[in-house]
Amino acid sequence: MSEERTERATGLDELVRRRRANLEALRRSGVDPYGQRYQVSHACRQVVDGFDGLAGQPVRVAGRLMALRRHGGSAFGDLRDQSGRLQVYFRRDRLGAAYDLLIDHVDLGDILGVSGDVFRTKKGEISVDAAEYAVLAKCLRPLPEKWRGLKDIETRYRQRYVDLIVNPGVRETFLSRSLAVRSIRAFLDERGFVEVETPVLHTLYGGAAARPFVTHHNALDLELYLRIALELHLKRLVVGGLERVYEIGRVFRNGGISTRHNPEFTMLELYQAYADYTDMMALTEELVAHVFRTVRGTTSVAYQGQALDFSPPWPRLDFSEAFEKYSGVDVADLDDDARAAEVACRLELQLGRPPTAATVIEAVLDRRVLPNLVGPCFLVDYPLSISPLARRIPDRPHLTYRFEAICAGRELANAFSELNDADDQRQRFLAQAMERAKGDEEAHVMDEDYLRALEVGLPPTGGLGIGIDRLVMFLTDAPSIRDVILFPLLRPREEV
């Protein structure tokens, strides 16, 4: 441990020791520092907003003591709950010995219940005149100092419980996320979609190009995979007659970590029978605009300094044209692995995967094309080689009815007219198997049961996937996906 960390740990130990001494002092005084149920009549914000009707009336509030300012025989405290902050007025002449216990042995961060009358101070601050208080939970670890805050990014992610306490903006981010998810459900429910749940543990993984996390079922002695997508089970349900289905669920991909990627993340996937990718474009525009209006009150926002307008309609850009414009490469020339490898070498692409046509197209797209697209826009008609589950365009057979919604240079949504020809799908899976044989661990695996489902009959179907985390990033102007995931995965480290 470094000298700085040792000194910090020593100082922390002393602060914890003092708080534990206060804990014991409360117990010696007959106060249970971990109190019982407390009946709350109002949230803090309700008291502030409802002052006109509550002035002079008794209320019972509870929250964390975030500040305490002494003035002779009285003190003003800031009590904070999920709704916001409320000032509490503590007086020795009213509380008696309990006031001295508060001053001597209650620490900032302790959770209190307070009852008293609502009033406004001479300075105009709406407050509660405490008639009594109860210690509901002792805070044994000091919170970061108000003027310094909790600013270290990694510490904020590791100790999200502290981050939520001392950084109110973080709490607002996750309240916005909750509201966004509720608004998505309401939007889809009103349009006749049925929410379902599909398995997280798969005997085969599929629906995306990604490496899975592997686990083991002891009782069955069976190797299983955490799902990398929701797609294939949802389309099985469409085969079974559930014509409009959706799921909002966690998926897991054993790949890199960046400001845009976390190993576990939340996806919305939906499927609509008798629709195609043009219907999915309209649905995407309407859904995203609805979420922005619900959460932000507008469809025009700034994201990391870029002005974005999510009001429909969004521009449609041809994939092949954009690919050549921004990379200088005709995607039609990447029709075999040899030419693709030459392009990868010429563009000095670091792939991390075998230089096949598919991997090179994806790398050029991510690094040369998408960064030039501010959006939101639709990039339409993707190559067949990177779209193994999408329907082929009849007069352009090397392309598919697939689009991605792009915003600020990153994918927000992915959708296509679903391939429902079982024989064509089998050939696509076989082609993917050849990619795996060349060393591409992210190529799709053969799924005989899914093929069997297609043989039963999948109606013409439009499918759509939206990354919830990325959507919330745009909603809250968050620079990193970790800012919108409550507990992102981090490498373990020695804790102080």
Image (cartoon, rainbow, N blue to C red):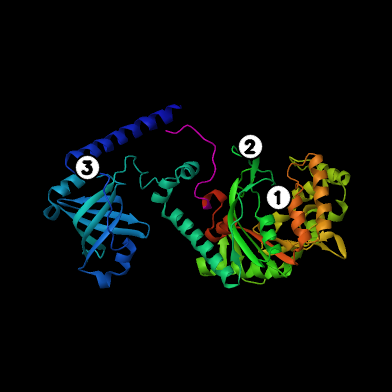
Q: Nearer the viewer, mark 2 or mark 3?
A: 2
Residue 3: quadrant of the picture: top left
Q: Residue at x 51, y 68 (%)?
A: 294
Q: Nearer the viewer, mark 1 or mark 3?
A: 1
Residue to which mark 2 is pinned? 221
Residue to which mark 3 is pinned? 105
Picture coordinates of residue 380 (x, y %)?
76, 63
Q: Nearer the viewer, residue 299 or 444?
A: 444
Badge 3 marks a residue whose secondary structure is helix
For mark 2, does the 10 Å Cα neighbourhood hold few (<14), some (14 to 19), or many (20 or more) residues? few
- The kind of secondary structure the magenta stretch mainly shows is loop
Mark 2 residue type: Asp
Marks 1 and 2, how far apart in space?
21 Å
Q: Nearer the viewer, residue 123 or 387?
A: 387
Marks counted in the figure total 3
Residue to which mark 1 is pinned? 206
Query: If you read the primary sequence from the N terminus, does the residue marked by circle 2 or circle 3 appear first?
Result: 3
